[in-house]
Image: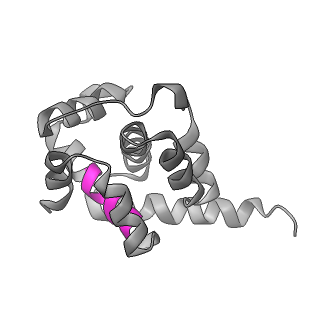
Amino acid sequence: MGFNFEQYAGEGNIFINEVAELTGFSRDKAARITQVVLHALRDRLQPADAVSLGQALPVIIRGIYYDQLNLSQLPQTVRGKEAFINFIHNKLSEKREFDRSDILKGLQAVTTVLKGRLSPEYYESIMREINEEIRELIDQQ
């Protein structure tokens, strides 16, 4: 089986387009929030679970997800809703473009897209690793 870059790019575009549709963001803004939300979720997981989640993502999104991953620093402890919003915000290079509500919309959109792509059991196993207050942020749609 050959490497079909166009197929992989298409799958990545679908993921970003879904986030853009759910948030109302431009594709560029949706791509940036997808990156930082995936990094924030990844950084809260145990190393094996972080790698496992990455393997479940479309190839192009997987590359974004694994960018700057340091397994020896996982999991990072972030407790509380505001601390997690700030954790995501601090990962943004364009901080002024995203306010608290943008970050919350992005978090909820990315996790909604993930939920639609993962088995219910696997999604729930990932969510169990994230503390309850952060799950409440995700679920308050």
Would residue 18 be visible to someone looking at this image?
Answer: yes
Q: Is residue 105 magenta?
A: no
Give the quadrant of the N terminus. bottom right
Residue 92, horizontal then vertical, whole percent: 35, 29
Principal secondary structure, stretch drawn in magenta: helix
Which residue appears at 40% of the width and 43% of the height?
45
Would you place residue 16 above or below residue 116 in this image?
above
Would you place residue 97 above or below residue 26 in this image?
above
Q: Is residue 141 left or right of residue 4?
A: left
Which residue appears at 64% of the width and 56% of the height?
59
Would residue 113 be visible to someone looking at this image?
Answer: no
Would you place residue 49 above or below residue 89 in this image?
below
Give the quadrant of the C terminus. bottom left
Which residue appears at 24% of the width and 32% of the height?
78
Please give the range of residues in magenta.
Answer: 106-115
Q: Quick one: 79 or 140, which is closer to the camera?
A: 79
Q: Is residue 122 left or right of residue 87?
A: right
Would you place residue 22 above or below residue 119 in this image?
above
Residue 61, horizontal then vertical, whole percent: 55, 52
Which residue appears at 27% of the width and 30% of the height?
87
Residue 19, horizontal then vertical, whole percent: 37, 59
Residue 54, horizontal then vertical, whole percent: 55, 51
Q: Quick one: 85 or 9, which is closer to the camera?
A: 85
Q: Quick one: 6 or 65, which is closer to the camera?
A: 65
